[in-house]
Image (cartoon, helix red, strand yellow):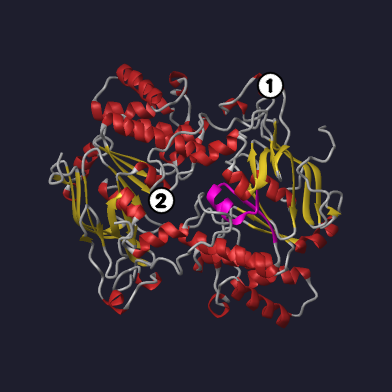
């Protein structure tokens, strides 16, 4: 077991923490019997009204973290505290009672909506499950929420998901997630299957919804520019661990972890003054999580790797105001 | 090679596709020249016709789907639109090669990767088995696959996405094509691997002097790779010009809107994005005038009446717009 000391980057002293995650792990079994630790001890917190971006490449565990929070599937270990209430050890019924407080929007808007149901039924369903609201009041709320996400209730009411575009389906997903007025909204790659013009509409909608409904958000995505646009703070994940966490402007302006720096250097920029040649920032690909490197997990691709990196795994430590990095040789 | 004698020349190219919803005008009058050794970035959103355009050049659209094919595709003194399947087979893979977005579905899953490269070499170049085997290993090495000889006996599923795309590139380069068409070659890849693959494409292109059509939705990718950019919207090219000038000073409002709607690393957090309202038209029944007019902030009445033709605007630039944006950085 890792030490149970509260990590330095958790803001336990603040009263407005909506979600606090401590040493979350998720292990999957493979058909061959091996164990893969997709999330290998991740801690973070999100304050009221804040958007935390969780960014990284495929296989880094970011999606598993988001899903573990809504128990799809539940984490293997670790502590999740939502609005002051620990979620571990709760019964199924107790968890269901918490469900209205946190909701999720998924990547593929079309496959995450039931193709046989009308748009009105899809958005109304959470209210039906919740119970205690009469049909007329429920439909009023559905109408209000569809309007709030930029859909015309009179047009989409009886339509099926396949009759809408990807962007419209994502609006429906957001309406369904917001109808219970959650405190925390988890978005898993909500715009990555959308074209850039539609992506901008959805990002703007999420910003508006956040203000209007007083949301706190966890925004999981691989696109660094998208994450920067929407997030107040950003955590970068690599192979199941957080390697850097900082306020957005700080992280993007002064990336301290060599992996963060490499990610940023890899993003092609359409600015005409951008350097013409795209350089490869780092060699190689993410190692198998079945057999992660000893010590720092990034060391096999890191230009700064030294013997200490193989021997000692670096922990997140402060290098500036609210800026934490897990590296023996950070860029300062 | 001079401008008067381009490698590839498209004239009023039309590819109308049979679909359950009706006849889709996927490519609807595209005229374009590409000189040898140049890189063209072909940019547009889903459904704009960029992939159908690429498949049209290679004659990869089945007759059952391609209901109406018009225009000319001039390549190496021939019109590929009027070539027989047997003639096309000699061009495909040999003179024009293509790589696709998803290498897993383009590679044969039950064949080791070495033999997949050998097939191309033996078919097009008539190499003997042992010769082809050596050349395949050499190609795998050239595209940056470590321990190429051992990797040649791997199956596609044993390789990562980035490695599979390298194998696709090795197959495409096997016969030293004059033109490589890359359709979203890095869209399925992580950003650090994308940078590696783009770097590889650039390096191989420079070494071989081949022309490259890079199809992508990502304006950042074309900025770093392309000599010239063509922007497609609703089956047509709406703007075309040298990359730096086009990105700095778009004339067609769609190009400008596309550039403004993407979040940028250089912008501060919470920068309001300028989304384009609505969505592209359904190409079964496209709008009468300019196809972008219903979404365009600058559109006036004449835009909805008459479609603007793409016209030369000096210094190698062309655009199709009745009310273009002024040059800001002239």
Instruction: Examine the rendering and report whether any part of residue B187 can be seen.
Output: yes
Percent of width and height locating residue A206: 61, 63
| Secondary element at tag 2 | helix
Rounded to the nearest angstrom, the CA distance separating label 1 from label 2 is: 41 Å
* Chain label for disc 1: A
Please report the residue visible at 49 percent of the width from the left and 34 percent of the height from the top.
Answer: A281
x 42%, y 49%: residue: A270
**Tag shown at residue A308:** 1
Q: Chain of mark 2?
A: B
For the record, the magenta segment spans: A216-234
Q: Is residue B108 left or right of residue B27?
A: right
Determine whether, in the image, residue B192 is placed left or right of residue A43. Answer: left
Q: Report the residue that reaches farthest toward the bottom.
A: A136
Instruction: Decide: is B264 above or below B181.
Output: below
Q: Residues within 10 Å of mark 1 (few under 14, many from 20)?
A: few
Asked whether residue B107 appears in the rendered view, the answer is no
Q: Which residue is mark 2?
A: B219
Classify residue B118 by image quadrant: top left
Q: Secondary structure at mark 1?
A: helix
């Amino acid at each position: 077991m890792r030490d149970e000391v509260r990590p330095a980057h958790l803001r336990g002293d603040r009263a407005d923490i909506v979600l606090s995650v401590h040493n979350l792990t998720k292990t999957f079994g493979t058909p061959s019997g091996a164990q893969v630790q997709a999330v290998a001890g991740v801690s973070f917190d999100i304050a009221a009204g804040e958007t935390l971006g969780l960014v990284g490449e495929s296989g880094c565990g970011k999606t598993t973290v988001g899903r573990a929070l809504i128990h799809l599937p539940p984490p293997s270990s670790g502590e999740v505290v939502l609005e002051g209430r620990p979620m571990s050890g709760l019964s199924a019924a107790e968890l269901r009672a918490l469900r209205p407080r946190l909701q999720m929007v998924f990547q593929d808007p079309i496959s995450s909506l039931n193709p046989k149901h009308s748009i009105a039924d899809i958005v109304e369903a959470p209210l039906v499950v919740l119970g205690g609201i009469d049909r007329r009041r429920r439909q009023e709320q559905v109408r209000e929420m569809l309007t709030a996400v930029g859909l015309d209730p009179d047009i989409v009411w009886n339509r099926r998901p396949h009759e809408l575009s990807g962007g419209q389906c994502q609006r429906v997903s957001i309406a369904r997630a917001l109808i219970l007025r959650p405190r925390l909204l988890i978005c898993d790659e909500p715009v990555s299957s959308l074209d850039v013009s539609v992506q901008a509409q959805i990002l703007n909608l999420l910003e508006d919804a956040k203000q209007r409904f007083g949301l706190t958000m966890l925004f999981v995505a691989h696109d660094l520019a998208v994450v920067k646009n929407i997030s107040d703070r950003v955590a970068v994940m690599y192979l199941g661990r957080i390697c850097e966490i900082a306020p957005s402007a700080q992280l993007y302006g002064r990336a301290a972890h060599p992996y963060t720096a490499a990610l940023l250097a890899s993003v092609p920029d359409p600015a005409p003054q951008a350097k013409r040649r795209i350089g490869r920032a780092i060699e190689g690909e993410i190692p198998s999580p079945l057999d992660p490197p000893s010590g720092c997990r990034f060391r096999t691709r890191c230009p700064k790797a030294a013997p200490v990196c193989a021997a000692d795994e670096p922990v997140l430590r402060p290098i500036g105001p609210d800026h934490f990095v897990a590296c023996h040789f950070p860029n300062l | 090679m001079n401008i008067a004698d381009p490698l590839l020349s498209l004239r009023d190219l039309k590819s109308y596709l049979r679909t359950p919803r009706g006849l889709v005008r996927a490519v609807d009058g595209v005229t374009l020249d590409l000189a040898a050794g140049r890189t063209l970035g072909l940019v547009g959103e889903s459904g704009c016709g960029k992939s159908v355009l690429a498949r049209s050049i290679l004659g990869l659209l089945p007759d059952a789907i391609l209901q109406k094919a018009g225009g000319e595709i001039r390549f190496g003194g021939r019109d590929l639109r009027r070539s027989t399947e047997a003639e096309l087979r000699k061009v495909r893979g040999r003179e024009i090669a293509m790589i696709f977005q998803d290498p897993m579905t383009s590679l044969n899953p039950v064949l080791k990767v070495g033999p997949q490269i050998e097939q191309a070499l033996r078919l097009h170049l008539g190499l003997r088995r042992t010769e082809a085997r050596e050349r395949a290993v050499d190609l795998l090495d050239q595209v940056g696959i470590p321990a190429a000889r051992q990797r040649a006996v791997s199956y596609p599923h044993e390789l990562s996405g980035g490695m599979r795309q390298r194998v696709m590139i090795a197959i495409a380069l096997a016969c030293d094509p004059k033109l490589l068409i890359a359709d979203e070659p890095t869209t399925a890849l992580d950003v650090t691997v994308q940078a590696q693959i783009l770097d590889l494409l650039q390096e191989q292109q420079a070494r071989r002097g081949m022309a490259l059509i890079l199809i992508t939705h990502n304006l950042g990718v074309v900025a770093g790779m392309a000599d010239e950019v063509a922007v497609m919207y609703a089956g047509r090219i709406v703007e075309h010009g040298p990359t730096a000038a086009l990105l700095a000073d778009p004339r067609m409002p769609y190009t400008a809107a596309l550039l403004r709607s993407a979040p940028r690393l250089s912008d501060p957090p919470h920068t309001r994005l300028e989304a384009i309202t609505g969505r592209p038209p359904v190409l079964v029944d496209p709008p009468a005038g300019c196809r972008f007019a219903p979404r365009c902030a600058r559109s006036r009445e004449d835009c909805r009446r008459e479609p603007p033709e793409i016209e030369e605007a000096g210094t190698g630039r062309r655009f199709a717009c009745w009310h273009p944006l002024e040059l800001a950085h002239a």
